[in-house]
Amino acid sequence: MAHDDPGRSYWLKAVGHARGPLPEAWLADERWHTRLTRTGFPRRPRIVPGDRLVLYASVWKRVFGIVEVTSEPRPSGHERWPFEVALEALLVVPHLENAPPVEAVGVAPRSMSQQSHIRLTPRQYALAAEAIGSIVRVD
């Protein structure tokens, strides 16, 4: 893994919710794969370009992707998620049944209760990259 950018922050970002969970094959569903180009927040986040987000399917309690933030937070025009950032996908697991549990990155699912995102330590991010990367690794 490349050395960490000292100015970069890492975040666990919830995607989906009880009334609108991600489908198991989320990447094949047009309504959801836009989550790889942008994601919304209920308030202006302290996230900046270059930060990395570990995507968390909240209903499934699994981590399924790593994306890099490519824009400053901006108005989204969405009532529930009034701010958004643009993203570039780095690594994703297309089927949630194959995605690692959030505990694999050292985070208890209850930590995300009522949160759209939480800060991760560089170690937790490294665990996420390793766990998600192991799904796509060829033996």
Image: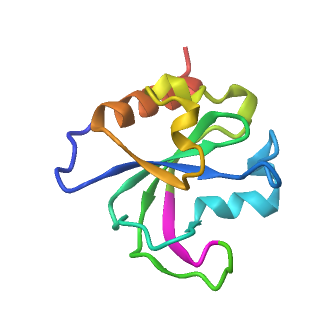
Main secondary structure type of the part rendered in magenta = strand
Q: How many numbered callouts? A: 0
Name the side, left or right, on which 60 lies relative to 53: right
Q: Identify the coloring.
A: rainbow
Q: Quadrant of the C terminus?
A: top right
Q: Residue at x 73, y 51 (%)?
A: 17
Q: Is residue 102 above or below residue 33?
A: above
Q: Is residue 90 above or below residue 106?
A: below
Name the side, left or right, on which 98 lies relative to 118: right
In front here: 114 or 61? 114
**Residue 60 place in picture, x, y as percent:** 72, 35
Does residue 1 appear in the picture of this structure? no
**Residue 54 place in picture, x, y as percent:** 49, 45
The image quarter containing residue 71 is bottom left
Q: Is residue 51 above or below residue 102?
A: below
Name the side, left or right, on which 105 lies relative to 49: right
Q: Is residue 66 magenta?
A: no
What's the magenta region?
81-88
**Residue 78 place in picture, x, y as percent:** 67, 80
